[in-house]
Image (spheres, rainbow, N blue to C red):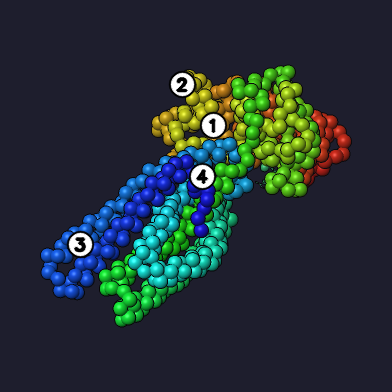
Amino acid sequence: MFDPALFKLPGMRRAAGILGLLAVIEGICIVFQAYYLSVAIVGLWHLHALSTIVRPMLIFAVAWVGRQLLVVIKNRVMYPLVERTSGDMRRQVMQKLYQLGPGYVAKTGTGNVVTTALEGIDKVQTYLMLVVIKVIDMMVIPWIILIYIAVLRWREALFLFAIFPLIILFMIILGYAAQAKADAQYVGYQRMSNHFVDTLRGLPTLKQLGLSKRYADNVYQVSEGYRKQTLAVIKIAMLSTFALDFFTTLSIAVVAVFLGFGLINGTIGLLPALVILVLSPDYFLPLRTFANDYHATLNGKNAFADVQKMLALPVPTDREQLGTTPIHWQADSTLSLRDVDFSYDNDDKLALKKIDLNVHGYQRIGIIGASGSGKSTLINLLGGFLTPVADQGEIQVNGQTVTHLSQQAWQQSFFYIPQNPYLFHATLAENLAFYQPHASREAIEQAAEKAGLTAWIATLPDGLETQIGEGSRGVSGGQAQRIALARAFLDDSRRVLLFDEPTAHLDIETEAALKETILPVLDDHLVFFATHRLHWINQMDYVLVMDHGQIVEQGTPAELAAHDGAYVRLRDEMVGAI
Ligand SMILES: Nc1ncnc2c1ncn2[C@@H]1O[C@H](COP(=O)(O)OP(=O)(O)O)[C@@H](O)[C@H]1O
Ligand SMILES: [Mg+2]
């Protein structure tokens, strides 16, 4: 019902202390309020002069105002803390995302990550704001009221005391049921987000295949599922609110009956009886408000757990085994992998098996294989976006053993050029100078020229200052690749290039034109080039043939062509396909 992890948040204990103190004062206000209201009513009942009830009514009013003020003050105490906590959390989540890298996003789904990082934290905010105050009220206020009632008459106090755990027990049972439904709802919500992001991204493909209608149905089904899950949560919430109201009202009625008998028998005066009756609903009130909001905050609780889980994920440590300055790959640099395994789910199923690889100096290494054979996985492992199975195999950079390639120094020494290079929402010049923010205008223009962008830039209204990226001017696939290449031209210090099928989605003419631009970049670089387009192979010095996560053959193109192996089979397949 209440998450102990909440109290581990910085500043929470102090705030809880203050809120506890305020709750005590509120409890006292409630008692005063009930007592003086009853005094006034009893006075009227006994037909005392109106002037005699002015003083109790004034005290009642002061207590009432004090009570309302305390609610405001409590929110004031909590609000900055919640703001700070959610701000911190957002920052931590972003930082964690950077540390975990693209591998994590690919594994969890973009929609999921967006949900956690954006809305998830909003929900956590609501959760913190609503739940902490109410829980503390619930732990403090009923006791103060109960003690006062016990002072007046122990029998009613005993009854109220006995009924409280019963109601809580009952709520816990309903809470578990609600939790199960809310968990399902949260999973459904994340599924829906993933579906939505998927659909947005796949819209061109879906349209092209004429599947958008069917996919729209699919999205409809998923959101229908979510609607049902939401209604299931609301059903339980309604049920438990009703049950709780019913039980508390019944309990108050029982107390009223007790008090009535007491009045008839003359064992209790009118004033204490009235005070007890007025206090009884307030005794249950914190419990009821907590229960009401409990269901509304279940999502926030799940989001909170989600964020905590993500923050607790292990990140690659020892990222500075190669030091903190970029290593400059040179003609005599070496990189070797021996028996390196990789698994996506840390289970037995290996996505890469016993990778053995020795490279030195400037070489062009082609990585070929059918789709799903592990080319991208290998590139991502080489880029350090994925970390290999621990305590297995060995990786060395310039003779120095490292546990993974998520090394700062290594990652600052290569360019990664995927199928769809990401363009940030910024000007073209800023995108070009992405790795070199201080590059001069001339250097940027030269790099753009080398990458074959000049003619296109001349057609843009604002030239290099044109906004591109998401929501701005569209950029074609070939142009995006050229921008990525220009980045490489601009920063000469990064001498390692990781290409992951950079031309896979381009038409043949665009690819041929782009190839002219790419080839010069490959000189004086260590290049890993994953591709399934054959014509690139002849440009490579060395080829790795992948199949089912293994390098099944490696050698120069000539060597591989000379004997009838995996390479020749793959080549024949591709030729056959054409
Ligand atoms: N994010 C992922 N989570 C789990 N499995 C994955 C993930 N990405 C790829 N795989 C699996 O790893 C294998 C190799 O995929 P990949 O490296 O993308 O192949 P290629 O790039 O050669 O087409 C495939 O079986 C694929 O299903
Ligand atoms: Mg791939």
Mark sitting on residue 56: 3
Type of amino acid under label 3: Pro
Quick check: 86 above or below 131?
A: above
Q: Is mark 4 on a helix, strand or loop?
A: helix
Query: Mark 2 or mark 1, which is nearer the start of the sequence?
Result: 2
| Circle count | 4
Type of amino acid under label 1: Ile
Report the front residue among 57 and 187: 57
Query: Mark 3 or mark 4, which is nearer the start of the sequence?
Result: 4
Q: Name the residue under label 2.
A: 441
Q: Position of residue 94 (x, y in %)?
A: 51, 39
Q: Name the residue under label 4.
A: 8
Which mark is in front, 4 or 1?
A: 4
Which mark is in front, 2 or 4?
A: 4
The residue that appears at 37% across and 74% down in the rendered structure is: 255
Which mark is in front, 3 or 1?
A: 3
Which mark is in front, 4 or 3?
A: 3
In three-dimensional space, the C-alpha distance between marks 3 and 1, rounded to whole angstroms, equals: 79 Å
535 vs 9, left or right, is: right
417 vs 278, left or right, is: right
Which mark is in front, 3 or 2?
A: 3
Quick check: 255 above or below 382?
A: below
Type of amino acid under label 4: Lys
Q: In which quarter of the image is the C terminus?
A: top right
In three-dimensional space, the C-alpha distance between marks 3 and 2, rounded to whole angstroms, equals: 80 Å
Mark sitting on residue 483: 1
Q: Is mark 3 on a helix, strand or loop?
A: helix
Q: Position of residue 558 (x, y in %)?
A: 82, 30
